[in-house]
Amino acid sequence: MPKRSREERFAYWLERIQRSRLPVREFLAKHAVPFGLTQYYRLQPAYERDGLEGLADGRSGGNHRFIHADAEGFLRWYVSTHLEVTQKQLREALKERYGIEITGWGLSVCLRRLGVGVRRAPKLEEVAEEWTPYAGVQLVVALAWYFGWPQATAKLIEKTMARARNSKRFASPGQKLDRRGRNPRGQFTRRYNRRSDVRRDRFESVERKRGSKSLSRMDLFKVSGEVLARRCLAVLSLPFVTHNGEIRTVDTAPGMALKTICGFQYKQATVAKFLAELKYLALSEDLLRFQVGFWQERWSGAHPNDEHLPLLCYYVDGNTKALWSSKRVKKNKVTMLGRVMGCLEQVFIHDGHGRPIYFETYSGHAPLGEHVLGLFEKIEDSLEGPGPKLPVERAIVMDAASNSVRTLRAFAAQKQYHYITSLDDNQWDFRKVRKEGRPQRYRFGPATLWDCEIELVDSSEKGYLFVTRAIKIEWDRGKETYLITSLPSQLIGASLVVKSYFDRWPDEELPFKIMKAVGCLHRVAGYGKQQLADVRVRKRQAELGATIDHLRARLHEPIVAVAELELRIANLIPKERRLRAHSKVIDGKRILPAAEAIEFRDFARRINALKSDVRAIRKEHQDFRKLEKAEREWIRLQGKETVYKVDVELDQIMTYFRVSLVNLYAHLSQLLGGSHLSLVRLLHTVLLLPGRIQETRREKRVILERNKKDLTAMDRLKSTIKAINQYGIRDGQGKQFVFSLN
């Protein structure tokens, strides 16, 4: 049998494949076919079109050489005369001159054979474009990267993690994992939340839970610094993205903006777990100290210190947040609700321009007053900064809630800080004035000032007198105000002291009010509770118990007499009730038979006489009132021997991120023209502008849509964009921000 040619063998197998019911891939795997799957799809169309000729192997003849000798000469000449020519242009020239169409790969082989080099056409860079309704917030994100905030916060977290590895506050690495309520891979299931110990300890204090937390199982120790910076940026943007600062709304529609802000579409569970692990890491103290120096350095060039001379003011203010809990937690008056209830109270220290530089959170009432000096001791080095100390007087401006003599005595015991505060009308007494200066006009408003010296009595130490400088202000409209200060009159005049106090509203209280709105500072973050003995209640219960025992001993005989009379009254009441039930009331009058009516009146007379005897005994012995009052108070305090202290760790961590966002807002507001553009106005005018974001491998271009209804703000934004583009800001992936206004 003659040997079949290559074309005949290929045709034989192609026809068998066509007749077979098996798929091509299975047929090739089952039989020893002389070609593969890729070659089959190339041979089958050629065989159907040209028959056996289409299966011929042209490699021995050099394949299809479209370019002849004349075309090769043309190629050499064209490349030598057109030095910047590209392959695409060269292929077009061949087609136009000789009608030769050749692929890019074929032309490359030909040029390589001829020894001719041609510049490749620049490869078009891929551009990922996305439209977002919150493109304006990218200005804040760019400033965060420009100041190095995400990198610095991530680095601080890494330092705290390194210190935690050597700490004994956490569980040992070799501790056995409790697998109840977990799947075989160690992941939590629904059964975990149904465990009795988990349900009981769900809101336990973080201090107690930290001892059973293993660092090796925390995600923080498994991710890189770049991921930490990205997650910090996601938490920073929560007040803007969720509109209320709550983690639980991250998975809603506004939360989709996280993709363009931090580069990843984080879910609620990821953000909540990240914050929970920061809480277990006890990071809040490090964050609070870190933020002082970080933002002081960023604001150092904004306002020179010389403009504040000779007085540098710091404002102390509080932020009370309502805490709804079924437990008996520490309470204070929540002004925004007008009631005394469980709360978290924050103490903020602001600089002379109203920017928050430090804060602390407390469960219940914050220890203001002399405790303010302790806060300044913690941040003193950061406030001073490097270099020589500034030759200015430092004054702490506080409201009337911090004017106790105990606080003033604490200020008098040191020389670095002075105080300026006010007195309520009921605290001012003209008889307490030791000296009164001549009246002088207020240089900054319609008022007359009297520089005085006043005596104040310490309520916590009977008979202790404290002398301080006071300023009486009589406004032309008829109202009077009283201030006290430790600043000496030889150094600072009365007008400057009064101005420093009343600048509190435009310089601190008004910006602070706006910060609460845009930064969600009034929101309470997740918390745990630590049960503590209420020392005051227990002490009061012991005092009341001793008082009750003492009064009962003194009133033994009268108490016995009263008890006998009350027993006789108790025996008569059922008899009177029987007659009362038999009676009828018609037109408001009781109807009884004559005999029963006489008996009813007799019972009433006897009961009233016995009650009169009881009143006489009580009137004779005045201690009965004291005993009843003590018993009522003792009963009221039952069950209140313990109180729950709320953990503030997570709340302080969240406030750190919110305050950082407010500082970034303030920087952008300053670039847009200063204080006349409030942060709320900034939010509505700039940050909520829609636009397109185009990302390449090297660049992140943000094209904002122009608001044609607010041309003045758009003009300011245009100049601001120009200034920000000159910074050459790059994000965590090295992409440069480029902003433009459409």
Image (cartoon, helix red, strand yellow):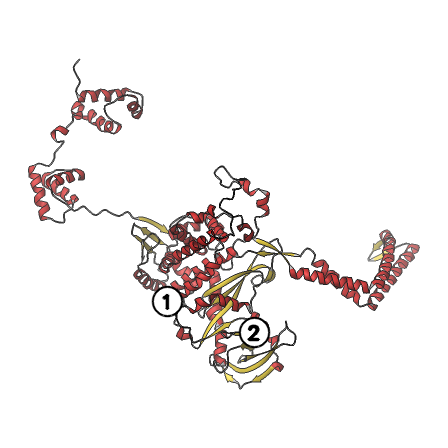
Q: How many marks?
A: 2
- How packed mark 1 is, by other alpha carbons closer than 10 Å (few <14, some 14-19, many 20 or more), is some
Picture coordinates of residue 586, whole percent (x, y): 83, 55
Which residue is farthest bottom? 438
Position above or below: 532 against 173: below
Residue at mark 1? 673
Kind of residue at badge 2: Leu
Q: In which image quadrant can residue 30 be found? A: top left
**Where's the C terminus, which quadrant?**
bottom left
Nearest to the observer: residue 624 or residue 244 = 624
Please determine whether, in this image, residue 410 is positioned above or below residue 650.
below
Q: Which mark is residue 654?
A: none
Q: Residues within 10 Å of mark 2 (few under 14, many from 20)?
A: many
Q: Position of residue 295 (x, y in %)?
A: 41, 64
Q: Say if 195 sits above or below 475 in the image.
A: above
In the picture, measured across the screen, residue 228 lies left or right of residue 562, that is left
Q: Is residue 226 above or below residue 288?
A: above
Judge left or right: residue 719 versus residue 296: left
Residue type, label 1:
Gly
* Image mark for residue 408: 2
Q: Using the numbered discs, state the Cα–Cα distance from disc 1 to disc 2 in whole angstroms.
A: 40 Å
